[in-house]
Image: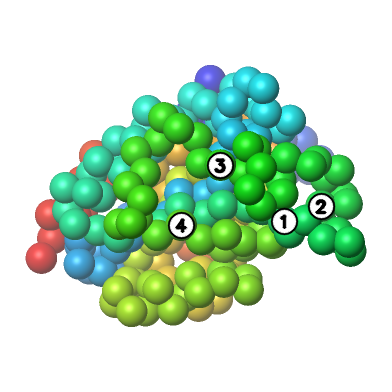
Amino acid sequence: MLRNKFYVYLNNNEFVYKTIDDNNFNILNILNKNVNSNNTCLIVIDMLNIFVRKSGDLYHENYKKMIPGINRMISLSRENNMPIIFLQHSYRDMDKPDRLLQVFKVENLLIGSFGVQIYKKLDVQHGKDYIIQKRRYSGFFGTDLDLILRENHIENLIVVGCKTNNCVRALVQDAFNLNYNTIIPHNLITTDDDLIHQVNLKDMIDFFSINYISEEKIKELLKNK
């Protein structure tokens, strides 16, 4: 598929397609940051029923296709005793509804609803993994995510999930502002439009210094001590 092999950029009002390669995009920056299992965690963004189940109001097949790969990253994180954080987008059921909920007009984003539950085929370990509810796109905004990361001496974030152009991008930008190093495994972020995904991915690579690399490269980095 297009999003697996290319990024796009705009040149003279025309979209130009170029390949993404492991040897580009801040690989040296990653190595210089001394990524290892002691200073790295996995963040899984909004892999919820509303996006991943076919009955979900915001379902798209792109989200469900990531499940095997995300579970591989979860297994890799457990093997290396790394913290795993699940972000859960949801809203309070109040007389004065949240402004973003009014935009979405989706009742299945309310706290406690079926839609905001983490998809059952993801390997979540309740009581061990962190589960953070958020009301805005970024997992940092109005949550204790930054405190959890600092308590665990985390410097590097492996980020997976959806949507590239909303919650993923918002978190990546805040992570950059807070001086975290962000790693995104190939094909483990996405959205419901391949072109929008590619444009935002290219933008994050260029302006937020994300490291977009293969799972194999990540395995190698986690062997560092």
The amino acid type, in three-letter code, at marker 4 is Ile
List the residue tagged with mark 3.
Answer: 117
Residue 123, located in which quarter of the rendered image? top left
Residue 216 vs residue 163: left or right?
left
Specify which label sits upstream in the sequence, 4 or 3: 3
Residue 216, position as x, y percentages in the image: 24, 39
Specify which label sits upstream in the sequence, 2 or 3: 2
Label number found at residue 131: 4
Residue 18, position as x, y percentages in the image: 54, 35
What residue lies at 62% left-to-right and 71% top-to-bottom?
141
Residue 11 vs residue 154: left or right?
right
The amino acid type, in three-letter code, at marker 2 is Leu
List the residue tagged with mark 2.
Answer: 101
Q: Are marks 4 and 3 in contact (CB under 8 Å)?
A: no
List the residue tagged with mark 1.
Answer: 91
Residue 224 vs residue 39: left or right?
left
Disc 2 vs disc 3: which is toward the camera?
3
**From mark 4 to mark 3, how far is it between C-alphas?**
11 Å
